Amino acid sequence: ITRFPLIPVRGVPLMNYIANNWDNIWAFCPDPSDLLIATYPKAGTTWTQEIVDLLLHNGDAEACKRAPTPVRSPFLEIVSPPPIPSGLDRLEKMDPPRVIKTHLPFQLVPPGFWENKCKVIYVARNAKDNLVSYYYFDLMNQSQPEPGPFGGYIHKFMQGELSWGSWYDHVKGYWLEREKRNILYLFYEDMKENPRREVERIMKYLDLSVSDEVVSQIVELTSFKNMKENPMANYSCIPSPVFDKSISPFMRKGEVGDWKNHFTAEQSKLFDEDYEKQMKDVDIPFRTLI
Ligand code: A3P
């Protein structure tokens, strides 16, 4: 297993096997019925994907399991090192409407998504928890660059040097376009606070209507505890040399505010000062930063 180096694509550092396939990714043209779930890594992608899949199957977990691939919605980008098939290969073999995941920042989303007016769900998570979750992911995912010590990792995050680039640009890019492009912009903290409310928001955005009972069932099936046990959600299908689960499980903690167990007071202060500067031009209602 190789820890792939990062190569910038229009200034955004991406793993080299993604950067090397960039032309194919940019040319990808979705069907207007396709749905895109977009996130900065570790913001709640899998959780949202699970909710969407269950909504599309009227809460029937068995029907979800019969879906064709072990991890259901493919990433648009090639996320798996060869020989695991790329997201593009898998998408070509699926019939629309498809659910497609991406970590690409707004400006790198292939233009076909906007031309075809695809629906897009974006999930954002507060910066500090997102950073901590990404740190553990980089420790355990042997195809990501080495995270190094936590203190240095904070600097890389602030400078946008991690894979997929700057968290700040990512959350702002989709935020600024959300009205024009009809993007449903969700927050991880809202999902934790009131999962039922957020499941219903997703349902309405997708023009679906499932019964109250099914909504309750979906909330239950997508609780952290249940998803941790669910092989369709916990990435147990990714072979252990790639995801080293002895370092950290994919479904790690699922909490808001875990950053407090990792940042020192000094690191937190430095981070907050920088955050003010980087976020001063937008007013995105992130919570639980303090
Ligand atoms: P932690 O590392 O903080 O535990 P992604 O799917 O974008 O990679 O995000 C993974 C993060 O979302 C992990 O965060 C994971 O535990 C958390 N997560 C996944 N499913 C969840 C759920 N049902 N409830 C709460 N958190 C969840």
Image (cartoon, rainbow, N blue to C red):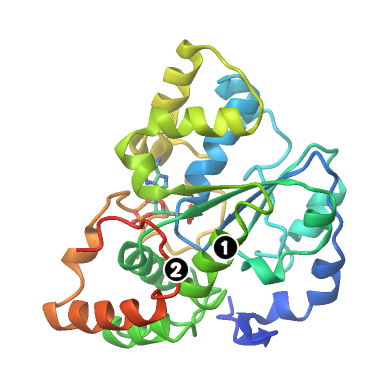
Q: Residues within 10 Å of mark 1 (few under 14, many from 20)?
A: some
> Picture quarter containing residue 26?
bottom right
Q: Kindly identify which residue carries mark 1.
A: 176
Find disc 2 in the rendering and name its residue: 282
**Disc 1 and disc 2: Cα gap in Å?**
8 Å
Q: Which is more toward the observer, 84 or 268?
A: 268
Amino acid type at circle 1 is Leu
Residue 241 seen in the current view: no
Q: Quadrant of the N terminus?
A: bottom right
Circles 1 and 2, Cβ within 8 Å, touching? The answer is yes
Q: Position of residue 160 (x, y in %)?
A: 48, 82
Is 167 positioned to the left or the right of 60 in the image? left
Exactly how many numbered labels are in the figure?
2
Q: Position of residue 236 (x, y in %)?
A: 50, 48
Quadrant, the C terminus: bottom left
Give the answer, above or below, for where 101 lies relative to 243.
Answer: above
| Residue depicted at 78% across the width and 56% down the height | 114
In the rendering, at what x and y percent does residue 95 appear? 85, 38
Residue at x 57%, y 16% (from the top left corner): 210
Q: Amino acid at mark 2?
A: Val
Q: Mark 2 CB in 8 Å range of ligand 1?
A: no
Where on the picture, by quarter, is residue 79?
A: bottom right
85 on left or right of 23: left
Give residue 134's position: percent from left, percent from top.
41, 67
Tell me the element at label 2.
loop
How would you rate the neighbour count of disc 2 (Cα within 10 Å): few for under 14, some for 14-19, many for 20 or more?
Answer: few
Q: Nearer the viewer, residue 150 or 185?
A: 185
For marks 1 and 2, the one nearer the N-term is 1
